[in-house]
């Protein structure tokens, strides 16, 4: 029985999910830690669109703006984590907000 | 502490360990990191076998203590991809439709992978790990 915790990073301007960090624990404990800081996770978020060979934009990297702001929600048990992953963008803003964060390169 | 006996470096057998376990990857899940924890020790290498629920597309990846990758891949229902050193997991069911995992890193009691979704994959990815120290 595995359990999960998840951070979901979304863009404030349109609530688009841009990045998640999920912790899966194989022995069924509530994951006690994230191995990365918020800043380290933010550094993973692509700032520029990445295109497939056909010109379509890769899922999760639809970031075309110069300045983007991100917030995140963090859930710490399996069902809520799954709910969060399953949720649409509008539901995310109603979830518990732990910390507000910013910004991509180029922001001031 | 390194112990030598007759000039030969001795290995503490108690420090060696292995663990096998399994989980799944929802093929519709978005891009992001996934940290797999609860291994019971700090792994220094691992093997990850991935199989799509279509029973056709799969990959087998090996990671050493330097986090280097060697994997073999079968995608698009049987196209062979060999000797990949970038993708640890590559489950592609059609052109431009893929879940792939790269950039493994070792963490306390497990590993972290960076997953990228391209296109709109569906189904389930079955993952089997063997962790080693």
Image: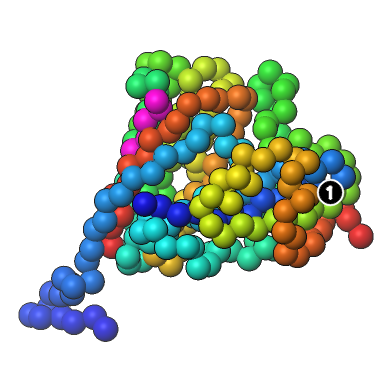
Q: Residue at x 51, y 52 (%)?
A: A78
Q: Is residue B75 rendered to the left or right of residue A40?
A: left
Quadrant of residue A28 within the rendered picture: bottom left
Q: Give the dominant element type of the magenta stretch: helix, strand or loop.
A: strand
Q: Is residue A103 rendered to the left or right of residue B74?
A: right
Residue A62 x %, y %: 76, 35
Q: Residues within 10 Å of mark 1 (few under 14, many from 20)?
A: some
Which coloring applies here? rainbow
User: Could you tell me if residue A98 is visible in this image?
Assistant: yes
Q: Residue at x 36, y 20 (%)?
A: B56
Q: Residue at x 68, y 31 (%)?
A: A58
Which of A82/B36 is in front?
A82
Magenta residues, as a range?
B48-53
Residue A91 x %, y %: 74, 44
User: Could you tell me if residue A105 is visible in this image?
Assistant: no
- Count of labels in the image: 1
Q: The numbered mark 1 sits on a residue in which chain?
A: A
Give the answer, above or below, for where B23 lies relative to A50. below
Residue B71 x %, y %: 37, 37
Give the answer, above or below, for where B48 lies relative to B16. above
Residue pushed farthest left? B6
Quadrant of residue B42 within the rendered picture: bottom left
Residue pushed farthest right? A108
Q: What SS does tag 1 mark? A: loop
Residue B30 x %, y %: 61, 38
Give the answer, above or below, for where B6 lies relative to B107. below
Q: Is residue B56 rendered to the left or right of residue B117?
A: left
Point out the image quarter for the C terminus of chain A.
Answer: bottom right
Q: Residue at x 34, y 45 (%)?
A: B22
Q: Label 1 belongs to which residue?
A: A12
Q: Is B90 one of the magenta-colored residues?
A: no
Give the answer, above or below, for where B32 lies relative to B56. below
């Amino acid at each position: 029985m595995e359990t999960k915790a998840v951070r979901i990073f979304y863009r404030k301007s349109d609530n688009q999910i841009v990045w998640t960090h999920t912790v899966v624990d194989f022995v069924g404990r509530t994951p006690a830690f994230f191995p990365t800081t918020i800043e380290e996770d933010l550094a993973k978020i692509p700032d520029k669109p990445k295109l497939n060979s056909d010109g379509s934009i890769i899922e999760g990297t639809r970031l075309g703006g110069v300045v983007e702001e991100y917030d995140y929600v963090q859930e710490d048990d399996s069902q809520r984590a799954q709910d969060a992953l399953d949720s649409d963008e509008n539901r995310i803003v109603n979830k518990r907000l732990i910390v507000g964060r910013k910004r991509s390169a180029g922001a001031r | 502490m390194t112990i030598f006996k007759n000039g030969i470096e001795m290995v503490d057998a108690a420090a060696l360990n292995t663990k096998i376990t399994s989980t799944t990857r929802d093929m519709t899940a978005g891009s992001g990191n996934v940290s797999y924890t609860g291994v019971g020790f700090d792994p220094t290498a691992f093997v990850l076998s991935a199989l799509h629920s279509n029973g056709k597309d799969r990959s087998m990846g090996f990671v050493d203590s330097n986090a280097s990758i060697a994997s073999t891949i079968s995608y698009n229902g049987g196209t062979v991809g060999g000797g990949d050193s970038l993708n640890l997991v590559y489950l592609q069911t059609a052109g431009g439709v893929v879940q792939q995992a790269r950039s493994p890193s070792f963490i306390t009691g497990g590993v972290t992978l960076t997953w990228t979704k391209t296109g709109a994959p569906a189904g389930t990815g079955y993952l089997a790990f063997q962790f080693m120290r």
